[in-house]
Image: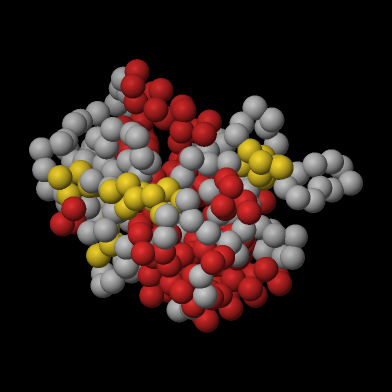
């Protein structure tokens, strides 16, 4: 039997980043990309409703407190410098939680790929999980799914959220927790109508229960849509976020002007300093582990 090229399953825990969910599961340790010890227990995200800027916890040092924020606050009431500071502090823990959850699921996918390649039997639960994820990410197969589930630097997520939401001041964010201007084409889903439409008709944007849901959908949108195939390919090898954003030219109708804006926002606000931050392990909770 060859070495496990993708992942090794270990009995660990998982963070769920949305309020109201039961915060239990498992962390699967990746041999590539995800470095989590089997001794790491479950995180306990705090739920904080933002009613004033003071409700947003400062982000200091390497470790970030796991917090799920529910917005009930107008960032537009702040000065520009304070608005940017508080917006970043609100976003960073949410981004890290969502990226962590995706990494956990991606680790499980990698382990299932290894089992398939070694002709090991998948039980019903594993098969359902894999098929649902393939559909969810619009993937052609399990290996394609594994590639699509990769994430990218926090600095890029911050820059896009800042531009698309006006640093938390847009109506889409205030009324719908929509940080990235993601449109809705399904009248059955929760959404709000944009102020201006097109010749083809009205425009709607998706409405989310919290900012974590918006960030999660953003990552899935970049994973699913064919327009971002080159971006997905490049993020497998490119470590420099300034080089990687070049391949987000199709995210906006402004194309490379949009890329230039991303670069400017990242540089002016030194957003790459947040790329090395991690969730604070001092908020881990012991004795809350389950296995697949």
Q: Residue at x 29, y 26 (%)?
A: 120
Q: Nearer the viewer, residue 33 or 82?
A: 82
Q: Residue at x 53, y 31 (%)?
A: 135
Number of numbered markers: 0
> Outermost residue toward the bottom?
268
Q: Is residue 22 visible?
A: yes
Left or right placement of residue 149 versus residue 22 in this view: right
Evaluate whether residue 235 shows in this view.
no
In the picture provided, is 73 more to the left or to the right than 11? right
Q: Residue drawn 28% across and 62% down?
A: 64
Displayed quadrant of residue 122: top left
- 133 is higher (above) or lower (below) than 52: above
Report the front residue among 131 and 166: 166
Q: Position of residue 289 (x, y in %)?
A: 16, 35
State left or right for residue 71 relative to residue 65: right
The residue shown at (60%, 64%) is 166
Which sits in the foreground, 226 or 54?
A: 54
The quarter of the image holding the N terminus is top left
Rendering coords of residue 175 (x, y %) = 58, 47
In this picture the colour scheme is secondary structure
Q: Position of residue 230 (x, y in %)?
A: 61, 57
Q: Residue furthest right?
A: 199
100 in relation to 161, above or below: above
Q: Quadrant of residue 259?
A: bottom right
Query: Compared with residue 205, is residue 281 higher up or lower down, i.e. above or below?
Result: below
Indicate left or right for 218 with 29 as reference. right
Q: Quadrant of the C terminus?
A: top left
Percent position of residue 271, x then y: 45, 73
């Amino acid at each position: 039997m060859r070495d496990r090229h993708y992942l090794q399953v270990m009995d660990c825990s998982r963070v769920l980043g949305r309020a109201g969910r039961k915060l239990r599961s498992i962390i699967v340790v990746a041999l590539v990309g995800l470095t989590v010890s089997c001794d790491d227990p479950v995180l306990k995200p705090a739920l904080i409703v933002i009613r004033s800027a003071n409700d947003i916890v400062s982000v200091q040092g390497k470790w970030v407190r796991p917090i799920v924020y529910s917005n009930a606050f107008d960032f537009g009431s702040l000065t520009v410098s304070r608005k940017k500071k508080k917006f970043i502090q609100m976003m960073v823990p949410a981004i890290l939680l969502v990226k962590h959850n995706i990494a956990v699921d991606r680790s499980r996918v990698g382990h299932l790929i290894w089992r398939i390649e070694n002709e090991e039997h998948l039980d019903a639960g594993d098969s359902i999980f894999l098929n649902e994820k393939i559909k969810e990410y619009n993937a052609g197969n399990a290996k394609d799914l594994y590639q699509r589930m990769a994430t990218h630097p926090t600095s890029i997520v911050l820059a896009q959220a800042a531009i698309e939401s006006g640093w938390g001041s847009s109506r889409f964010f205030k009324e719908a927790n929509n940080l990235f201007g993601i449109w809705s084409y399904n009248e059955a889903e929760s959404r709000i109508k944009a102020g201006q439409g097109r010749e083809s008709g009205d425009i709607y944007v998706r409405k989310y229960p919290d900012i974590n849901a918006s960030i999660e959908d953003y990552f899935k949108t970049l994973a699913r849509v064919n327009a971002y195939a080159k971006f997905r390919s490049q993020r497998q090898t490119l470590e420099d976020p300034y080089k990687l954003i070049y391949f987000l030219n199709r995210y906006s109708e402004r194309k490379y002007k949009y890329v230039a804006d991303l670069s400017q926002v990242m540089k002016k606000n030194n957003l790459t300093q947040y790329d090395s931050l991690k969730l604070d392990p001092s908020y881990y909770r012991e004795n809350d582990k389950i296995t697949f």
